[in-house]
Image (tube, helix red, strand yellow):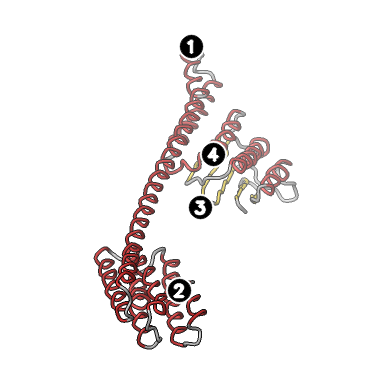
Amino acid sequence: MAGISAVLQHQRHRPVQWAMLGAALTCSAVVFADTRRRGCPAPWAVWLDVLVTGSLLPFVAYTWGGARAPESIAWVMLLGGSSAALATVGLRRRAAATAIVLLVVTHASGYIAVAADTAVIGAHLNALVFSALISRVLWWYLRRQGTLLGAANDRALAAEAQRARYAERIKHHRALHDTVLATLTAIAGGVDAGTNEVRRRCAREAAYLRRLVEQTGDQEAGSEIFTALEESVRSAESLGLKVTARYHELPSVPADIARAMADAVTEALNNVRRHAGTGHAYMTVTGDSGRLTVAVVDQGHGLVPGRAAPGFGLTRSVHGRMREIGGHCTVDGAPGEGVSVELRWPR
């Protein structure tokens, strides 16, 4: 802005001055574009600004620009401060020191050529070096603060992950207490372990433990959907349906999506129990790039031509719930080959 103001007010009729101003603005634009693209200026862009704006323009102003007095060359010299600041930030220490020395020699020579006072020369060189030093300090401080902030953010993320793992462990502990431990305590207290009801309950709890053990550490992100679907599976098992469930790379989904998917699975399992003519269902849950797919399959009667799809709830409850959350339900089957219900979210 200082250069534009100086040229407009005092040297607007000198084409060389406008060319110099254009060169300085071009160098600044190159540095800005490179910094925006890479996150920091490349050394070549910094040296371009130092050599053109900081070192070449003072001599151009004196030789062809008609600058023969300190006040007429001052706006060009002022640009050297920005070049010095940029050099300390964009170059390594030795290269930055070399650039500062070059700028000091160039600007001292330029002011001597226009017969400036020693005080003017000293003040300008002091400002030049001070701009470089203060820029270096600010650059170091901001980098240090960024490092500290990044470390604090990492600690916060680690603490949050630890809290999530702890909450998940507590959830599993409660589930084990209410299921497996309750069954074992009942047997230890004298309940006959040979009855059909106790054996069926033990089989359900063994299946639950097996699924819990199979859930590996990389599936922690999908704990919300795992817990919700497990409630559906255990509900179906409590009503006498055997469910073989497998989970693979569960994605992290919102709580309302997990709940809606679990409700749809509950209805699909109820459909198997009521209409398939089989006591066994298979559920597979997979995640791929944030997409959740749940397949509920049975090997029962299947879909018979000319008859309605088994279960009013399959068409209304399952399809309706999936539409409400932006998902999709596909039902496929053939006579004697069972029915496959596939739930996908998002659609």
Q: CA distance from mark 3 to mark 4?
A: 16 Å
* Mark 4 nearby-residue class (10 Å; few <14, some 14–19, many ≥20): many
Image point (62%, 47%), residue name: 341
Query: The residue tagged with tag 2: helix, strand or loop?
Result: helix
The picture places residue 209, in percent across and down from the top left corner, at 46, 31
Q: CA distance from mark 4 to mark 2?
A: 50 Å
Image point (34%, 71%), residue name: 120
Q: CA distance from mark 1 to mark 2?
A: 82 Å
Q: Which mark is residue 29?
A: 2
Mark 1 and mark 4 residues within 8 Å of each other at the beta carbon? no
**What amino acid type should be assigned to the residue bearing mark 2?**
Ala
Q: Which residue is at the front of the view, 23 or 308?
A: 23
Q: Which mark lies nearer to you, 4 or 2?
A: 2
Residue 107 appears left or right of 150: left
* Mark 2 nearby-residue class (10 Å; few <14, some 14–19, many ≥20): few
Q: Give the residue number, with chain letter if any, for mark 1.
A: 189
Q: Which residue is at the front of the view, 307 or 127?
A: 127
Q: Give the residue number, with chain letter if any, for mark 4.
A: 224
